[in-house]
Amino acid sequence: MKKIVAVIGSSGAIGNAISNRLLEDDSVETIYKFSRSQKSEGNQKEKNFFIDIEDENSIKKSTENIPEDIKFDMIFVATGILHNDDDIFPEKSIKDINADKLKRVLSINTIGPTLVGKYFIPYLNNKNKSIFAFLSARVGSISENKLGGWYSYRSSKTALNQIIKNFSIEIKRTNPNAIFVGLQPGTVSSFLSKPFEKNVKSENLFTPDFSASKLLEVINNLESKDTGKLIAWNGEEIQP
Ligand SMILES: NC(=O)c1ccc[n+]([C@@H]2O[C@H](COP(=O)([O-])OP(=O)(O)OC[C@H]3O[C@@H](n4cnc5c(N)ncnc54)[C@H](OP(=O)(O)O)[C@@H]3O)[C@@H](O)[C@H]2O)c1
């Protein structure tokens, strides 16, 4: 049976690269793409829908576009923020912490993906293996935190990792075929990483397409025992 997949945040660098790889994959029948900036359907395999993950009603409404008989073999959440063109930038020190900015980062990186889980989990295939993957980050690991800083981004990803673990525990009872994972994509050239790319050796800065190919490899190799984990682009498990 061919697969039906969903990508939430398909307009981002990694979300777009994942979508393009899935479009070329003959084992995939249809891709449901959800983003704020809808693009026209260039391929009959894809369907585009609007979603704003900062608005619970928008997330709920976006699922109303999914036909009742559709079950996803994979749902890939590729949304996220580290900085914006306006006033958000990772905090270097305690004095940079600001309540409104902290709330905004948590809203996009933690609350949004959590609500996406709430409304999309019922659409996961429960007859065969299905994957619910969320792009997370290594800096969300408490045990690996040696540098400090980046208060809002780090903590938003730490909390996301906990949510993913919780989903995995609860859904194991009703859908033992479902695997929930956080994925670390490597350092990938994108709007999100742009201000920090100069600090990264060129061989460690991935193109979105390279990262997407490695992440899809990781996803294809996932087993039930991996549910709830944070896994890097190279298959390495990252400790919480
Ligand atoms: N790039 C890296 O080096 C790196 C490293 C570790 C982890 N990650 C994680 O990977 C994920 C994707 O990053 P990226 O590098 O692909 O960044 P990106 O190109 O900036 O993409 C971010 C995506 O998030 C979407 N988004 C933000 N707020 C949204 C909202 N309210 N509603 C709907 N969509 C929203 C953006 O949509 P619009 O196009 O509408 O703005 C865009 O599709 C993030 O979770 C990031 O933390 C990235």
Image (cartoon, rainbow, N blue to C red):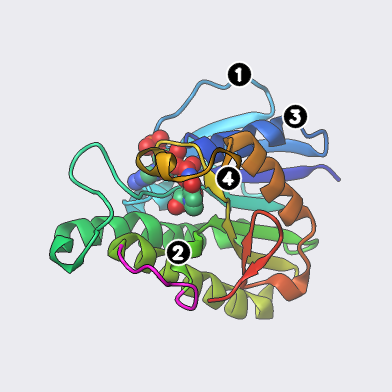
- Which residue matches tag 4? 204
- Identify which residue, 137 or 119, lies in the foreground: 137
At 18% from the left and 68% from the top, the residue drawn is 94
Q: How far apart are marks 1 and 4 (CA)?
A: 32 Å
- Which residue matches tag 2? 139
- Identify which residue, 82 or 74, lies in the foreground: 82
Category of crowding for the residue at label 2, using alpha-carbon neighbours closer than 10 angstroms: few (below 14), some (14–19), many (at least 20): many
- Which residue matches tag 1? 42
Q: Image quadrant of residue 37? A: top left
**Residue 226 in the image: above or below residue 61:** below
- What's the mark number on residue 24? 3
Mark 2 CB within 8 Å of ligand 1:
yes
- For label 3, the SS is helix
- For label 2, the SS is helix
Q: Which of marks 1 and 3 is in front?
A: 3
Q: From which residue to which does the magenta span run?
A: 142-149
- Measured from the top left, where is residue 73 in percent x and y? 72, 52
Q: How far apart are marks 4 and 2 (CA)?
A: 16 Å
- For label 4, the SS is helix
Contact between labelled residues 3 and 1, with CB atoms less than 8 Å apart: no
On whether residue 146 falls in the magenta region, the answer is yes
Q: Image quadrant of residue 134? A: bottom right
**With 224 as the anchor, is 60 left or right in this view?**
left
At 70% from the left and 41% from the top, the residue drawn is 213
Q: How far apart are marks 2 and 1 (CA)?
A: 36 Å
Label 4 vs 3, first from the N-terminus: 3
Q: Which of marks 4 and 2 is in front?
A: 4
Mark 3 CB within 8 Å of ligand 1:
no
Quarter of the displayed picture in which ligand 1 can be seen: top left
